[in-house]
């Protein structure tokens, strides 16, 4: 069933992208689970994602659907800027944001736009480990997304915040996890126009 959903998402995304601006995006992020408690530390899950955004201009407004592959550390980790793509025991997911936005500043040299919307995160799998299994997680999660994108000449940087509104963990998972956490994520992205 997961393969069917993944193929459907790619087909739908390709349909949106025909004849529009297509941006490659690479993200680094930190996320916190709202109810998670770890003694003596402020828990942050590290991760990265990459994928594409389709930018559909409509006057001064933008419609921005996206499709990303995402990896998030299963357990909180200390961020190391020297190894931002370190491999941990990871949760793998497909993320499908859909945002609406508008230009605040637009010229040949600089472009600033603000955007927001919803994102669905679809679980693809969890690396083998001794603590949690795939069935302990919800297959589909939702979040509100807000962000800002700044382009100066050819360099484009985006900062965004995701505020999850659905549980990360399944209500009655096989491992007995009793956690109502929702994900809070901040990410920094580099974006490059493909065509």
Image: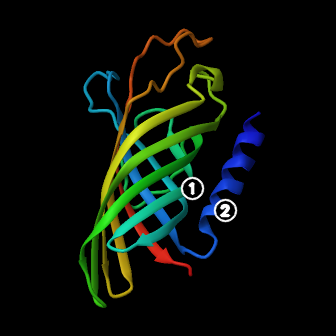
Mark nearest the camera among 2 and 1 is: 2
Q: Nearer the viewer, residue 18 or 194?
A: 18
Relative to 30, say whether 132 is above or below. Answer: above
Q: Secondary structure at mark 2?
A: helix
In the image, residue 30 lies at what x, y percent? 36, 46
Q: Of residues 40 and 20, which is closer to you in this image? A: 20
Evaluate if marks 2 and 1 touch, with contact meaning CB atoms under 8 Å apart: no
Residue position marked by numbered label 2 in the rendering: 15
Q: Is residue 57 above or below residue 165?
A: below
Q: Residue at x 47, y 52 (%)?
A: 98
Disc on the earlier residue, 2 or 1: 2
Q: Secondary structure at mark 1?
A: strand
Residue assigned mark 1: 67
Residue 163 at x, y = what percent? 34, 38
- Check the image and report above or below for 157 versus 85: below
Label 1 neighbourhood size at 10 Å, few (<14), some (14-19), many (20+)? Answer: many
**Quadrant location of the C terminus?**
bottom right
Residue 2 in the image: state x and y as whole percent: 73, 36
User: Is residue 151 in view from this perspective?
Assistant: yes
Instruction: Count the marks.
Output: 2
Q: Measuring from the top left, give residue 187's x and y in whole percent.
A: 36, 53
Q: CA distance from mark 2 to mark 1?
A: 12 Å
The structure's colour scheme is rainbow
């Amino acid at each position: 069933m997961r393969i069917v959903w993944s193929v459907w998402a790619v087909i739908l995304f390709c349909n949106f992208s025909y004849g529009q601006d297509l941006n490659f995006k690479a993200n680094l992020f930190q996320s916190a689970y709202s109810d998670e408690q770890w003694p003596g530390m402020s828990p942050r899950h590290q991760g990265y994602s990459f994928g594409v955004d389709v930018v559909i201009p409509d006057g001064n407004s933008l419609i921005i659907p996206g499709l990303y592959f995402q990896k998030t550390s299963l357990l909180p980790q200390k961020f190391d800027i020297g190894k931002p793509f370190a491999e941990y025991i990871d949760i793998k997911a497909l993320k499908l944001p859909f945002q609406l936005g508008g230009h605040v500043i637009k010229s040949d040299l600089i472009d600033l736009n603000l955007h927001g919307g919803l994102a669905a995160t679809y679980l693809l799998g969890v690396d083998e480990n001794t603590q949690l299994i795939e069935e302990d997680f919800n297959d589909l999660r939702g979040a509100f997304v807000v962000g800002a994108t700044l382009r100066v000449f050819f360099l484009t940087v985006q900062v965004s915040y995701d505020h999850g509104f659905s549980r990360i963990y399944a209500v009655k998972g096989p491992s007995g996890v009793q956690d109502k956490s929702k994900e809070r994520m901040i990410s920094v992205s580099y974006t490059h126009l493909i065509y």
